Amino acid sequence: MTDTEADTLELPPVPTFGNGRPRVAAQRVHPRRLGRGHLALYARLRAWTIAENHPARGKTVAARSGGLAFGALMVWRTANEEPRLLAVAAGAYAIQAWRAGRPVPRVPPVPPTEDELKRRVLLGVQHLIGDRPAVFLADVYAAFLTRPAAAHMDAARLRAVLVHCGITIHKSVRIGDQTGRSGIKAADITTLLSPKREETPDSDVDAGHTPLEGAVEPA
């Protein structure tokens, strides 16, 4: 074996649980999975017994508790008469616990769409405006640049983001006694955030037909 071949060799994957050789550890029944499954089965049984969202909870809890007590009595009598059945029941419970303890795969978070990001920017500007008729652009820059998401941006790039979101930047807005500074009006943000209504036809006549063709002859 040459040195170049040795550098390209890859080791077989090693499981994330167990100790020892990989082949032996992969076939080992890990006790943590059994413990997780036991807790999951206990939680299901407890939720079924207490019947939290049941309309007749009192009667339901009494009936289910009585059924569990009767089942426990039958299991105890069967264990005294046939101990082998107890071993079979324990094995079946271990299998159910093993299945219930299966690790849930982690679903990666879905990144927000461009429309959702635009809406977040609009909501942020609307929050800065508050009850005022407008907000100065310098105040928007100062507020947005303190956010971690915009820490890497400057005023020019932030202005480009506002324009990309459809926000109109007016050269002069008036807020109280202050005027002559560029800013954003509250009416523009409200218009952008309002849902767009779909245009409906003026009449119920299908396209391609004249009103006389769509009309119904009187009886």
Image (cartoon, helix red, strand yellow):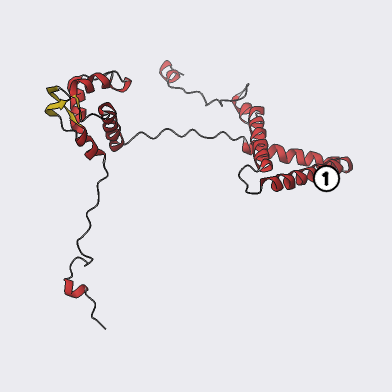
Position of 101 with respect to 148 (left or right) is right
Q: Quickly name the residue at label 1.
A: 74
The quarter of the rendered structure image containing the C terminus is bottom left
Whether 174 is drawn above or below 80: the answer is above
User: Is residue 28 visible from the viewing direction of this image?
Assistant: no
Whether 3 is drawn above or below 131: the answer is above
Neighbourhood count class around disc 1 (C-alpha, 10 Å): few under 14, some 14–19, many 20 upward: few
Residue 41 % position (x, y): 66, 38
Position of 190 with respect to 53 (left or right) is left
- Which quadrant of the structure image shows residue 89? top right
Residue 212 % position (x, y): 17, 75
Residue 164 % position (x, y): 19, 32
Q: Residue furthest front?
A: 177
> Looking at the image, which residue is at 20% across and 31% down?
133
User: Is residue 94 visible from the viewing direction of this image?
Assistant: yes
Q: Nearer the viewer, residue 21 or 158?
A: 158
Q: Nearer the viewer, residue 125 or 161?
A: 125
> Looking at the image, which residue is at 65% across and 36% down?
43
* Badge 1 amino acid: Met
Q: Nearer the viewer, residue 212 or 77?
A: 212
> Looking at the image, which residue is at 13% across and 29% down?
170
Q: Count the marks.
A: 1
- Which quadrant of the structure image shows residue 185? top left
Residue 131 % position (x, y): 26, 30
Position of 54 with respect to 215 (left or right) is right
What secondary structure is found at the residue carrying circle 1? Answer: helix
> Looking at the image, which residue is at 19% across and 20% down?
138
